[in-house]
Image: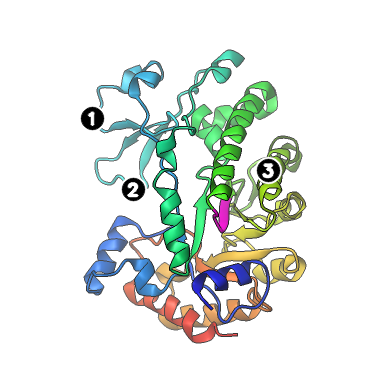
């Protein structure tokens, strides 16, 4: 099988020749330095470890600061201040620009519905957004690798990035019109992006939001059902309406048990990242393995940084026997590979998938 055939078989819950491998979240900059130091540097990490998927991201055009200056007057003179294409501000740490940024939400002080209606979102009809990725998708697939199209910070996360986390969570309770206006505008943008991906022949669309922490949902289940589930359903219906067999991958960190049945109900095909520190993966496979495929499952909080190569090998073997029974698993780190991960652990991870992953 080619990598693409392997991924599609596994994610459609049939048995491929072997378990496919993932590194979609990538490496932190320091970990990339470790990679190049330990290899000859002629290959990418994905090529070196034989990763079966490639992320094919569209390219939003940089935001024009003048469009958002009114939201950030007190920060404009800070040399470490920047805004992303959605208009969300950030001040980077003087020590690192990777994880540690101070986020500044442009609508943090909004008081009227018109401020949500008039807020400037990226112009995703700009032909430059997708001009390069279309050719990249074709090239990757012609090379026998599965093409994955990310929807970035799907719906909920982008909404609270723009509004502010506390402010948005309060809106869900006391200003639902504010929350719904922002969610609907973001949903419309996500549907347009998803349709572009389908038109370009993408294999998997990755969406979702971090709706949970390690103890459970970030909101009441009733709030999820009212404000988020119908919007995920509409997004997936639009995708499947164009091409039924396009796979939809839903990402949420944390303990996902309380929404798994809802995700299946709206048409999700794949659950990611299956965080092992807070989910019973055997139970999830037993209860939902006939309806969902699983992507991820290799813990980056404990196992990869602090386990031994032998412990990693044993965990990979166990996951293949449980989550991967009868197909339906794509193994890889649950998030970014951090600097604390020893090189020998990374080698052990992908070596073990090769060693134990044949069906």
Tell me the number on the disc at residue 284: none
Q: Upstream in the sequence, badge 3 or badge 1? A: 1
Label 1, residues with CA under 10 Å away: few <14, some 14-19, many ≥20: few
Q: Which residues are magenta?
A: 201-206
Relative vertical location of residue 86 with respect to residue 351 in this rendering, above or below: above
Q: Upstream in the sequence, badge 1 or badge 2? A: 1
Q: Position of residue 313 (x, y in %)?
A: 48, 82
Which quadrant does the C terminus fall into?
Answer: bottom right
**Left or right: 116 as drawn, with respect to 245:** left
Label 2, residues with CA under 10 Å away: few <14, some 14-19, many ≥20: few
Q: Nearer the viewer, residue 113 or 122?
A: 122
Label 3, residues with CA under 10 Å away: few <14, some 14-19, many ≥20: some
Residues at marks 1 and 2 touching, judged by CB atoms closer than 8 Å: no
Q: For mark 1, what is the residue?
A: 79
Q: For mark 3, what is the residue?
A: 238
Q: For mark 2, what is the residue?
A: 98
Q: Position of residue 333 (x, y in %)?
A: 48, 65
């Amino acid at each position: 099988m080619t990598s693409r055939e392997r991924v599609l078989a596994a994610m459609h819950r049939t048995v491929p020749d072997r378990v496919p491998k993932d590194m979609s979240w990538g490496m932190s900059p320091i970990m990339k330095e470790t990679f190049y130091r330990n290899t000859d540097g002629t290959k990418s990490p994905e090529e070196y470890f034989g990763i079966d998927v490639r992320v094919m991201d569209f390219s939003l055009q940089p935001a024009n600061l003048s469009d958002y200056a009114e939201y950030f007057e007190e920060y404009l003179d800070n040399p470490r201040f920047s805004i992303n294409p959605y208009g969300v501000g950030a001040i980077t740490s003087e020590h690192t620009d990777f994880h540690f940024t101070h986020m500044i939400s442009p609508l943090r002080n909004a008081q009227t519905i018109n401020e949500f209606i008039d807020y400037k979102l990226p112009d995703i009809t700009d032909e430059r957004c997708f001009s390069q990725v279309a050719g990249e998708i074709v090239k990757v697939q012609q090379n026998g690798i599965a093409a994955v199209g990310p929807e970035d910070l799907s719906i909920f996360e982008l909404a609270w990035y723009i509004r502010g986390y506390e402010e948005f969570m309060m809106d869900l309770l006391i200003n639902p019109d504010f929350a719904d206006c922002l969610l609907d505008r973001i949903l419309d943008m996500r549907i347009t992006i998803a349709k572009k991906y389908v038109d370009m022949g993408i294999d998997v669309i990755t969406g979702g939001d971090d709706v949970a922490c390690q103890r459970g949902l970030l909101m009441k289940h009733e709030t999820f059902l009212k404000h988020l589930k119908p919007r995920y359903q509409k997004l997936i219906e639009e995708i499947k309406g164009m091409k039924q067999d396009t796979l939809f991958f839903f990402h949420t960190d944390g303990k996902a048990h309380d929404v798994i049945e809802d995700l299946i109900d709206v048409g999700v095909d794949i659950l990611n990242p299956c965080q092992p520190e807070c989910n019973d993966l055997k139970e999830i496979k037993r209860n939902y393995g006939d309806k969902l495929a699983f992507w991820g499952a290799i813990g980056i909080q404990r196992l990869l940084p602090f386990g031994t190569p032998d412990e990693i090998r044993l965990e990979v073997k166990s996951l293949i026997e449980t989550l991967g029974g009868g197909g339906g698993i794509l193994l890889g780190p649950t998030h970014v590979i951090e600097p604390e991960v020893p090189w020998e652990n990374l080698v052990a991870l992908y070596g073990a998938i090769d060693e134990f992953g044949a069906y």
